[in-house]
Amino acid sequence: MLDRSEDYLTADEERTLLRIARDSLEAWVLRGERLNLKPYPLTETLRASHGAFVTLRTGGELRGCIGHTVGRQPLAESVRDNAINASSRDPRFEPVRPDELPELTIEVSALTPGDTPESPFKRVEDVSEIVIGRDGLFIERPPERGGLLLPQVATEQHWSVDQFLRAVCMKAGYPDGTWRDPQARLYRFSAQVFGEGE
């Protein structure tokens, strides 16, 4: 069960974003077109800058997931663009084929504000701050590339905080326990997560 204490989208806004994600996916996969958002009822919140991830699944199995953590564009545009990216630019998968569209389900993770307005990240000073189901994790050790896991991953995998920390280090390609390294920076972040069929 996800912690919904940091929700900022209404049920109608969630439905609008899922419609945008679905329509974007179909426009891109079927016609190679980027969806025009003008016909959609974009509220002030959907026009505000927020990061977002779009996750695609087939039969419960991951089929693509890509997103932006930094809010550089309106949330509605981030969802549109990442629906396209998840279907065609996730290096772990081949691009989505037209015949797969009916079987795909879409999940959106709309990131909530963090320590600064442009970022969802909150620096972790003590791992006791991390709450499974509420928090995602991001670790970085510059100049190396970092690793990120969305909040729902720990819940789906039934992980403890220790297992979540181990997994985010592995995702970044770091040795186990890197989060204790003084050169590493560990952040938590929250997202409002919703999907088709909920």
Image (cartoon, helix red, strand yellow):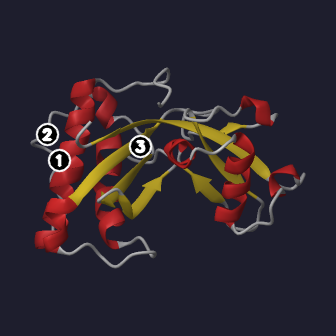
Residue, disc 3 = 109
**Mark 3 or mark 1, which has the lower sequence index?**
1
Image position, residue 75 (x, y; %) = 35, 41
Q: Residues within 10 Å of mark 1 (few under 14, many from 20)?
A: few
Assign the C terminus to one quadrant of the image.
Answer: top left
Residue type at tag 1: Leu
Residue, disc 2 = 40
Image position, residue 134 (x, y; %) = 56, 32
Residue, disc 1 = 37
Image position, residue 67 (x, y; %) = 44, 55
Residue shown at the point (67%, 55%) measured from the top left: 168
Q: CA distance from mark 3 to mark 2?
A: 19 Å
Residue type at tag 3: Ser
Q: Going by the image, does 26 lie left or right of 53?
A: left
Q: CA distance from mark 1 to mark 2?
A: 6 Å
Circle 1/circle 2 CB separation < 8 Å: yes
